[in-house]
Image (cartoon, rainbow, N blue to C red):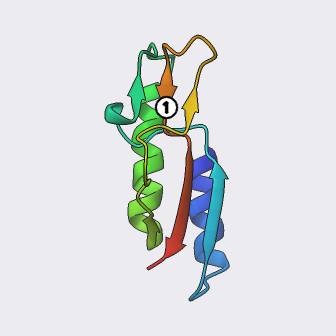
Amino acid sequence: MLWVDLLVALKVYDSSLMCIAGDFNSVRSIDERKGATEGVGWKEDTRLFSVLIENSGLVDLPLMGRKYTWVKSNGRCMSRLDRVLVSD
């Protein structure tokens, strides 16, 4: 699984300063989605993504100014997919 592999890589390349930013295409909780249906494996992916962040020593910087970073073209589905993770 991607999040497990990333956690292992973070432990191998242990660094005091780290910044990982971009579209992770995953949310950390149901509160970060609106109007989207739950797909296969959605809950497990959400759980593993949160475990990665909690166990990696990275801090998920808060989003400023809005709640979601992605909105479907019809405006009905929204998610927070983009984030910046920095070392603690």
Does 15 sit above or below residue 83?
A: below
**Which percent across, then down, holds residue 24?**
61, 45
Residue drawn at x 55%, y 61% is: 84
Most extreme residue toward the front is: 65
Does 85 sit above or below residue 67?
A: below
Does 73 sit above or below residue 31?
A: above
Residue drawn at x 59%, y 85% is: 17
**Which percent across, then down, holds residue 50?**
41, 50
Can residue 42 be seen at all in this image of the molecule? yes
Where, quadrant-wise, is the C terminus in this rendering?
Answer: bottom left
Give the residue type that dot 1 points to. Ser
Assign a secondary structure to mark 1.
strand
Residue nearest the viewer, comparing 56 with 21: 21
Most extreme residue toward the left is: 31
Can residue 41 be seen at all in this image of the molecule? no
Badge 1 density bin: few <14, some 14–19, many ≥20, Cα 10 Å: many
Quarter of image, res 47: top left
Residue where numbered disc 1 is placed: 79
Residue nearest the viewer, comparing 9 with 46: 46
**Which percent across, then down, holds residue 33?**
41, 28
Residue drawn at x 53%, y 72% is: 86
**Which percent across, then down, holds residue 32?**
39, 36
Where, quadrant-wise, is the N terminus in this rendering?
Answer: top right
Residue drawn at x 41%, y 43% is: 28
